[in-house]
Image (cartoon, rainbow, N blue to C red):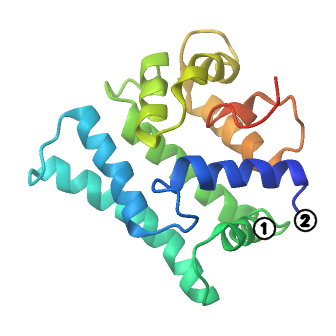
Amino acid sequence: MLSDFQKEKIFHYFRVVLDQDRNGVLEENDFREIGESLCVLWVYKPGTKEYNEVIDKNIQSWNMFKKYFQKQGAEANEEQFLRFFEVLLKPGNEEVYKKWVKYMISSIFDSFDVNEDGVMSVDEYSDMFMCYHIPIKHSAKAFVKLDRDGDNYITKKELVRAVDEFFRSSDENAPGNWLFGFWGDKD
């Protein structure tokens, strides 16, 4: 069972990161909007191969969620999204969870490690905030919290730990709580 603290974070992920039109329901257009924001960042013009690939990849992310919601016969609202994570994070689903985390980390690095050096700089991390329409004013503080070794980069290992803390930890002081920015009265 998820703690109230975990639920707060999952609702933040739903409301701020994924539900781009803020209508309380995840839809294909939310993921298309994220893709379009990436294309603006990278200056990919509509109709180009690069533009279409980015949009398609984001629609694939939507299709992953959509399959779950269709299987449940439910709308992709906050309540159902929370149930998705209750199932994903349930003891015994470790392999499914690990695959999901691997997919998420790959997606973030594929999208924001622009120079493909295998790490995220503070600028690349800030780009993530802009593309997801997360209030950017806390991106630098979030970056510092996630850069555990202080080398001015977020590695895949650091990002895996942050994702794990964000979704699984009930520790209010865990740096991973800042993965998607400031979302509560926590520091």
Which residue does the numbered mark 2 point to in the structure image?
A: 1
Q: Are marks 1 and 2 in contact (CB under 8 Å)?
A: yes
Residue 67 appears in the figure = yes
Q: Quadrant of the C terminus?
A: top right
Is the residue 51 above or below the residue 137 in the image?
A: below
Q: Which structural element holds mark 1?
A: helix
Q: Which structural element holds mark 2?
A: loop
Is the residue 140 above or below the residue 130 in the image?
A: above
- What is the three-letter code of the residue carrying label 1? Glu
Mark 1 or 2 closer to N-term? Answer: 2
Q: Position of residue 159 (x, y in %)?
A: 61, 34
Q: Residues within 10 Å of mark 2 (few under 14, many from 20)?
A: few
Q: CA distance from mark 1 to mark 2?
A: 7 Å
Q: Which of the 4 image quarters holds residue 79?
A: bottom right
Q: In terms of depth relative to the viewer, which is nearer, 103 or 129?
A: 129
What residue sits 66% from the left and 56% below the top?
Answer: 98
Q: Left or right: 4 with respect to 119?
A: right
What residue sits 42% from the left and 59% below the top?
Answer: 30
Is the residue 21 above or below the residue 90 in the image?
A: above
What residue sits 69% from the left and 35% below the top?
Answer: 162
Q: In terms of depth relative to the viewer, which is nearer, 156 or 143?
A: 143
What residue sits 17% from the left and 47% below the top?
Answer: 50
Residue 101 appears in the figure = no
Q: Quadrant of the N terminus?
A: bottom right
- What is the three-letter code of the residue carrying label 2? Met
Which residue does the numbered mark 1 point to in the structure image?
A: 86
Q: Position of residue 154 (x, y in %)?
A: 56, 23
Direction top: furthest residue: 151
Is the residue 55 above or below the residue 80 in the image?
A: above
Q: Position of residue 172 (x, y in %)?
A: 88, 34
